[in-house]
Amino acid sequence: MMKKLLLLSLTAIGLPAFAQVNLKSQAAKKADALEQKVIAWRRDFHEHPELGNREVRTSGIIAKHLQSLGIEVQTGVATTGVVGLLKGGHPGPVVALRADMDGLPVTERVNLPFASKVKTQYNGQDVGTMHACGHDSHMAILMGVAEILSGMKKDLHGTVKFIFQPAEEGAPAGEKGGAEQMVKEGVLQNPKVDAIFGLHISSAVEVGKLTYRPGGTMAGVNDLKIVVKGKSAHGAYPWQSVDPVVVSAQIISSLQTIVSRNVNITENPAVVTIGAIKGGTRFNIIPESVEMLGTLRFFTPADEKLVTENVKRIAIKTAEAFGATAEVWAPYTNHYPVTFNNVVLTQKMLPTLQETAGKSNVLLVPPVTGAEDFSFYQEKVPGLFFFLGGMPKGGIGLTAPSHHTPDFYIDESGFTLGVKTLCNLTLDYMATNGK
């Protein structure tokens, strides 16, 4: 029935239905044939990871591949980003597809023949470097999509922008980068993008499955800094001090009431986390100040305002109650909007996800409190961001090694589904949004 409806809708807009089905069939066969090539690209990227705004080798490989396919290529976007432009043989919408490129300052512990041994500097520290979030997979998948779609260029009813983005995990201190910077440098213009699609592989979703959510799918985030200033004294005479350590402890405890007592968690989740606290130099000296760093997560602008204002009020007023002072920065260095899947676009493209993976393998999931800077694209144009299964079959999601950890692991057999899905989203969007 679903295929019949799709054929009818395609015929209604004047694009021969059989031609569209034939293109998707070609794409599927090519994706199967490209599987080992995609895996090889991924392994190469995995063995040679580069941190945000440092993806020089990585972007060079991508640019060379796109150029070899006859795609117009722009390099150096937002420092190391690569943008490919594929103009189809017929007029139609502009579809953007995005993959992120950066690795993380994590030392790999997985026993793989292509495991990363790379060491580098991050924030002045010597660190290992690893693709501990799957960005290597995203790049390889999109390179496969570019190869397939470029091979059917004359039959495409529209234009495809391939966006290979640096620094999704955040630019180094004092630098600009990521999706926000790419948007500022015009990646969604010339030609103007009509819709954007992106995927993220998941170590906790079984291979062969896709997950999605309309509306708020990943949290917006503000990082947080609080500095509490008191009065220093000898640890043996605490009555002579205004102890910022004790004040900070009270603040941390009180901050936990924001989610439990202020946020309506029946509507949207929220998170207030203090991840670092620094103060003092010696066991018997009460310090003059304490610094706390944390993260705030939310799914609506109203909840962002609620959480942020309550953090500031609690920190400042608690400090005042003890005779200390508190300064609060939220956001401190970065802010990501909510990753918001356009509801109309998601509904329109859901049949494509279901057709590609099988209806039983496409799962509606709760929101995720992780964040993604794909959200900056979605602020400007309708976007759909979904998750691709990367956990071996039979695995248990709750016990699978988490993203951003040394043991992060991805089953490569899921890559072909990612290639097919991005191809089909592009072809179906073009077919149903002809200009």
Image: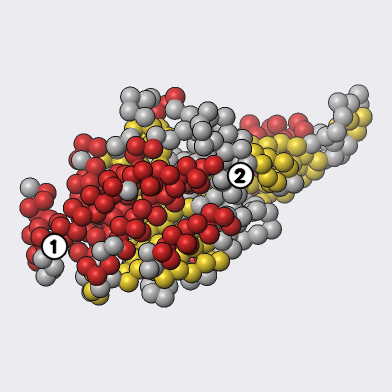
Residue 311: assigned label: 2
- Compared across the picture, whether 279 is left or right of 397 comes to right
**Hey, what amino acid is under mark 2?**
Val
Specify whether residue 66 is in view.
yes
Answer few, some or many: residues within 10 Å of disc 2's Cα (few below 14, many 20 plus, some between 14 and 19): many
> Residue at the spot x=91%, y=24% of the render?
236
**Hey, what amino acid is under mark 1?**
Ala
> Residue at the spot x=24%, y=42% of the render?
357
Answer few, some or many: residues within 10 Å of disc 1's Cα (few below 14, many 20 plus, some between 14 and 19): few
| Alpha carbon distance from label 1 to label 2 | 57 Å
Q: Which residue is mark 1?
A: 19
> Residue at the spot x=70%, y=31% of the render?
249
Quick check: marks 1 and 2 in contact, CB under 8 Å? no
Q: Quadrant of the C terminus?
A: bottom left
User: Closest to the observer: 273 or 302?
Assistant: 273
User: Closest to the observer: 182 or 419?
Assistant: 419
Colouring style: secondary structure
Specify whether residue 308 is in view.
no
- Compared across the picture, whether 213 is left or right of 427 comes to right
Above or below for 400 versus 378: above
Q: Position of residue 375 (x, y in %)?
A: 45, 55
> Which of marks 2 and 1 precedes in the sequence?
1
